[in-house]
Amino acid sequence: MKPRPTICAILPGLVAVALLVAACQDSSRPFAPPHKPSFWAGGERQCPIGKFTGGGRIDPTPTNTMYGKVTFGFNIFLDQHCNVLKGQLEVVHHPSQTKFHSVSFSSASEEGTCVTFFGTVRAKHANGDWHEHSFGVRTCDNGEPGSSPGTGPDTFRFAITDDDSFGHGDTGDTPLTGGNIQAH
Amino acid sequence: MSIKSTLGLVVALAAGAAATGVAQSISGQAFGVFVNTPAASQAQAPLAVLPAISGTDGDIAHADADVLGVPNTLSSSFLNSTATGAIGTAETSAQSVATVANVTILNGLITAGELIATVTSTRGASGVTSSTNGSTFENLVVAGTPVTSGDQPVAPNTRLELPAVGYVVLNEQVPLGDGVTSGGMTVNMIHVYLQTISGGIVDPLTGQLVGGTATTTGEIIVGSATTSVGG
């Protein structure tokens, strides 16, 4: 007759399974940054706010290469070293009927309550085909409400950095006509 | 730590969060058109709904369409809907934007080059606020009368009669929540109410119907954005 396993014999196995589950959960976190010790300074950029969200409208003037009605929405989540944990960006330039959707983010930085981030968007002009461009965004939470009657105080800037044709270009730092930027 | 003291700590933290105005829920949605009439229907489209957010997280939703029409009721193009929002430790906000171009309603009874609905709701230390700044109509014409020239706002809840059809409310604003612990706003840029009138008499001098009871039989909404933040 085979001896029945005792709790002492099973316990090490249970501990091993628990450790394995914990390790698997830890490694499955999306966008997990490389692990660094808590005292890490390392000379890297610092992003103490780390979380920005916003949406609304700007009306850049013709002094900019992208002007007229522009609507947008975004969120961007950074770790303390400015690695992009997750983010999305939607921008619509109405005069040219061009829409932009983010594909990826390459870098980001913070300055006060402003965030700047770069990456790649796919763009589509009216009924045309989707194609990709490099982009940059700089946006600032300058107070509440983000857009008073008139404009501002919050600002948003969207620029296609590899093309200056109609529907692309640079909005410049433009105060919000509507909506809000929130630095959390 | 005992179960009682743990529960006490949880309750204290929750009370503290409420006292400092930290919102624990947000919502947002935007859509271009909605039609519900006896003759035709069109579900809210393109519809962007902010996913449920828990903890201190955030998200975004987007939907678009090149063209969208309902025969004899509505035509439009270049429709874009976006909703964003995030819950923070000190402040929470949601933003929604809906845009629709080349709008024609009821065979030209109402036309607009483009309209933008934008709304934002924020909850922070100073309380709950909502704003529809930036909501405008481009070259809006109602029943042959120009309402805006170029891109302009229209006063909230502007009601115009549409003889033999019903009426339209422009920049319709519907507050949400109690305004203290929760709040928000829906803005419908064009909301047509179709009506029939029963009873009443025809004035022999003007030929117009006098009296009677109006019954709403359908509605058309173009450009709608909603945000709310809750405790």
Image (cartoon, rainbow, N blue to C red):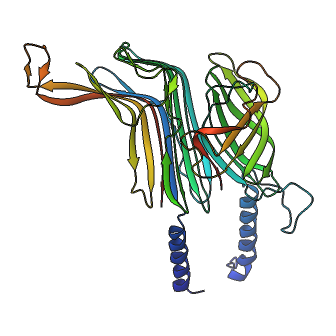
Q: Which quarter of the figure is the N terminus of chain A placed in?
A: bottom right
Looking at the image, residue A128 sits to the left or right of residue B136; the answer is right
x 75%, y 50%: residue: A31
- Residue found at the far front of this picture: A150
Query: In front here: A14 or B42?
Result: B42
Locate residue B180, reporting x and y percent: 43, 60
Looking at the image, residue B17 sits to the left or right of residue A169; the answer is left
Q: Which quarter of the figure is the C terminus of chain A placed in?
A: bottom right
x 36%, y 12%: residue: B107
x 63%, y 29%: residue: A92
Locate residue B21, reporting x and y percent: 52, 64
Hey, which quadrant is residue A38 in on the image? Answer: bottom right
Looking at the image, residue B184 sits to the left or right of residue A20; the answer is left
Locate residue B75, reporting x and y percent: 44, 17
Figure disc tally: 0
Hey, which quadrant is residue B36 in on the image? Answer: top left
Query: In front here: A9 or B194?
Result: B194
x 70%, y 25%: residue: A123
Locate residue A11, reporting x and y percent: 72, 78
Measured along the vertical axis of the image, is residue B217 above or below residue B113?
below
Looking at the image, residue A175 sits to the left or right of residue B215; the answer is right
- Residue found at the far right of this picture: A43
